[in-house]
Image (cartoon, grey):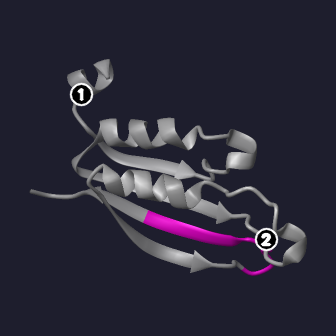
Amino acid sequence: RELLQEEGPFDLVLCSDCVYELVYSRSWLQLAEAIDVVCGQDTVVLISLQRRIREGPEYSTQPDDGIDAFLAKLESKSLTLEQLYAGKPPGAFDTMEVLRLRRDCC
């Protein structure tokens, strides 16, 4: 917060593969708070996410990846999400998503 007071909001924030509850637990809560703190009216946030949820009865007990809760938390902080990409890159098993976030104006 000191840096933010001295320099102002960030111009760009990049996050890549930072949300996966099975590995990182619920640390996405702190990540959402940090993004909210450094995000000003002109800040662009780019986030890439890997959806690791498997389908089928053998995966019925798989824990939630936390991504939907993370995105809902960001939206609750007056940040608008725009999906730039969602799909499986060639040769990939998991779905990838790329999102752009901006602070809601006015």
Query: What amino acid does circle 1 point to?
Result: Glu
| Location of the C terminus (image quadrant) | bottom left
Q: Secondary structure at mark 2?
A: loop
| Residue 63 badge | none
Q: Residue at x 56, y 77 (%)?
A: 86
Query: What amino acid does circle 2 point to?
Result: Arg
- Mark 2 and mark 1 in contact? Answer it, CB < 8 Å: no
Q: Which residue is mark 1?
A: 7
Tell me which segment is drawn in magenta.
90-99
Question: How far from the left and from the top, in percent, is residue 2?
Answer: 30, 18
Side of 12 relative to 94 (left or right): left
For mark 2, does the 10 Å Cα neighbourhood hold few (<14), some (14 to 19), or many (20 or more) residues?
A: few
Question: How far from the left and from the top, in percent, is residue 37?
Answer: 32, 36
Question: How far from the left and from the top, in percent, is residue 11?
Answer: 30, 46
Q: Secondary structure at mark 1?
A: helix
| Location of the N terminus (image quadrant) | top left
Q: Residue at x 46, y 58 (%)?
A: 71
Q: Which residue is mark 2?
A: 54
Q: Is residue 39 magenta?
A: no
In the rendered image, which quarter is residue 83 located in?
bottom left
In the rendered image, which quarter is residue 61 located in?
bottom right
